[in-house]
Structure formats: structure tokens, C-alpha cells
């Protein structure tokens, strides 16, 4: 499972960095959508890589990363709903696609946080 998550995390990180670079110059969108693209996605991708590359992580760190990933999912779903509802220009499916890896990663992080062999109980 960890190897599959690493592959997904590196793909997500590459996509997040690319859209952070390109998203700043995209036509349309508001400050909130740009912050999600330029700040939140790269932070979530880096946090996910940190989670996967650290074999020993405190439960607090794992849960903090899960919370950041969950915030990313919520922000993307809100953007997808705003686009689908006509409040913003764009393709609603793009932010919806961005929810896939963080949503799976939240489940991974929660499983890791509550499995005693994978995380330090502190």
C-alpha cells in the first residue's frame, strides 16, 4: 500500500507544482481559487510526501497532515460546486480530479494514525 501511495503522492506533487506555476497566469478565477492552486495543493503534496517518507511519525503529525489533506479536498469540492453552479468560470471536473489523491491519502493517514505499529503514540 505504501508504494502505491508513494507513486500517487509523487504524481500529485508533480501536478500540484505544475498547476501552481501555470495557475497563477490562468485567465479567470478569484483569489480563493488561486490560493488553493498556488498554496494549498503544494503544501498538501509536500505534507503527504513527508508522511510517506517518515517511517516514524507522531500521531499528532499524522493527524495534522490528514487535516490538511481533508481541507484540500473540501476546498476543491467547494470550487467544483461553484464552477458547476455557474458562480465561477472553468471546468468543474478539474478541481474534482484534484480531490482523488488527497481523499485516498486521508484514509491512509487515518489508518496509519490509529495503527500502533506504524506511528509513534505520542
Image: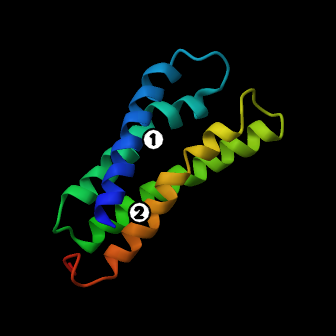
Q: Residue at x 59, y 34 (%)?
A: 32
In this view, which residue lies farthest toward the right? 86
Secondary element type, mark 1:
helix
* Dot label at residue 70: none
Label 1, residues with CA under 10 Å away: few <14, some 14-19, many ≥20: many
In the displayed structure image, the side of residue 81 where residue 66 appears, left or right: left
Distance in Å between CA atoms under marks 1 and 2: 13 Å
Look at 31% across and 54% down and name the residue there: 6
The quadrant holding residue 80 is top right
Indicate the position of residue 109 as horizontal and vertical percent values: 37, 67
User: What is the residue that sits farthest to the bottom in this orientation?
Assistant: 116
Look at the picture and state if 26 lies above or below 17.
above
Judge by depth and name the residue closer to the eye, 92 or 122: 92
**For mark 2, what is the residue?**
66
Q: Answer yes or no: do the residues labelled 1 and 2 have beta carbons within 8 Å?
A: no
* 88 sits to left or right of 112: right
Quadrant assignment for the C terminus: bottom left
From the image, tell me which residue sits under label 1: 40
- Tag 2 secondary structure: helix
Residue 4 location in percent, x, y? 35, 58
Q: Count of labels shown?
A: 2
The disc, 1 or 2, on the residue closer to the chain's N-terminal end is: 1
Q: Residues within 10 Å of mark 2 (few under 14, many from 20)?
A: many
Q: Residue at x 23, y 76 (%)?
A: 118
The N terminus is located in which quarter?
bottom left
Residue 29, percent from left and from top: 66, 25
Locate residue 46 relative to residue 56 in the image: left or right: right
As drawn, 103 above or below 45: below
Amino acid at each position: 500500500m505504501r508504494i502505491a501511495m508513494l507513486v500517487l503522492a509523487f504524481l500529485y506533487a508533480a501536478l500540484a507544482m505544475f498547476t501552481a506555476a501555470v495557475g497563477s497566469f490562468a485567465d479567470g478565477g478569484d483569489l480563493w481559487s488561486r490560493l488553493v492552486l498556488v498554496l494549498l495543493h503544494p503544501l498538501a503534496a509536500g505534507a503527504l510526501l513527508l508522511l510517506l517518507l517518515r517511517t516514524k511519525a507522531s500521531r499528532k503529525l499524522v493527524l495534522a497532515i490528514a487535516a490538511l489533506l481533508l481541507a484540500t479536498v473540501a476546498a476543491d469540492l467547494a470550487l467544483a460546486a461553484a464552477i458547476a453552479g455557474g458562480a465561477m468560470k472553468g471546468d468543474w471536473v478539474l478541481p474534482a480530479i484534484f480531490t482523488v489523491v488527497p481523499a485516498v491519502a486521508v484514509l491512509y493517514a487515518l489508518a496509519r494514525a490509529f495503527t500502533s505499529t506504524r506511528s509513534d503514540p505520542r
